[in-house]
């Protein structure tokens, strides 16, 4: 989820980015790719590839979001 004119950074390797062109154009989204990124990014990718870290993901329904 990106704001209008937001930047999507893809670092390292991975899958495909599946997004209709009209959504990219109308929202003026920028895609930025970098094979390695910073030295810290590289270290994290190597650790993940070696299975030495575990990635955790959690999904939350948008209706649970409250603004102050």
Image (tube, grey):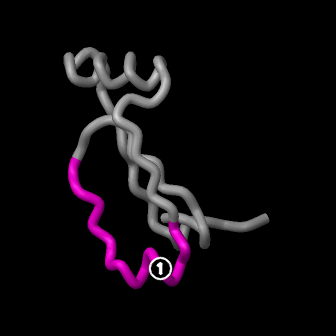
Task: Name the residue carrying label 1.
Answer: 25
**Picture residue at 40% right of the left edge, 39% below the top:** 34
Q: Is residue 40 left or right of residue 58?
A: right
Residue 37 covered by magenta stretch: no
**Picture residue at 51% right of the left edge, 68% below the top:** 29
Residue 22 covered by magenta stretch: yes
**Measured from the top left, where is residue 15 in percent x and y?**
21, 50
Q: How many marks?
A: 1
Check disc 1 and report its element: helix, strand or loop: helix
Q: Quadrant of the C terminus?
A: bottom right
**Measured from the top left, where is residue 49 in percent x and y?**
22, 23
**Picture residue at 60% right of the left edge, 68% below the top:** 5
Q: Is residue 54 left or right of residue 37?
A: left
Mark 1 Cα within 10 Å, few/some/many (few <14, many 20+)? few
Q: Quadrant of residue 31?
A: bottom left
Q: Between residue 51 and residue 60, name the one nearer to us.
A: 51
**Measured from the top left, where is residue 16 in percent x and y?**
23, 56
Q: Between residue 27 and residue 55, name the one nearer to us.
A: 27
**Measured from the top left, where is residue 4 in percent x and y?**
60, 72
Q: Between residue 68 and residue 21, name the one nearer to us.
A: 21
Q: Quadrant of residue 52?
A: top left
Q: Is residue 5 left or right of residue 13?
A: right
Range of the magenta residues? 15-29
Above or below 7: residue 33: above
Q: Quadrant of residue 61?
A: bottom left
């Amino acid at each position: 989820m990106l704001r209008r004119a937001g930047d999507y950074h893809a670092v390292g390797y991975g899958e495909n980015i599946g997004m209709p062109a009209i959504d990219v154009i109308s929202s003026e989204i920028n895609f930025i790719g970098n094979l390695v990124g910073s030295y810290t990014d590289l270290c994290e990718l190597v650790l993940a590839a070696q299975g030495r870290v575990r990635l955790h993901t959690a999904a939350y329904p948008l209706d649970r979001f409250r603004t102050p």
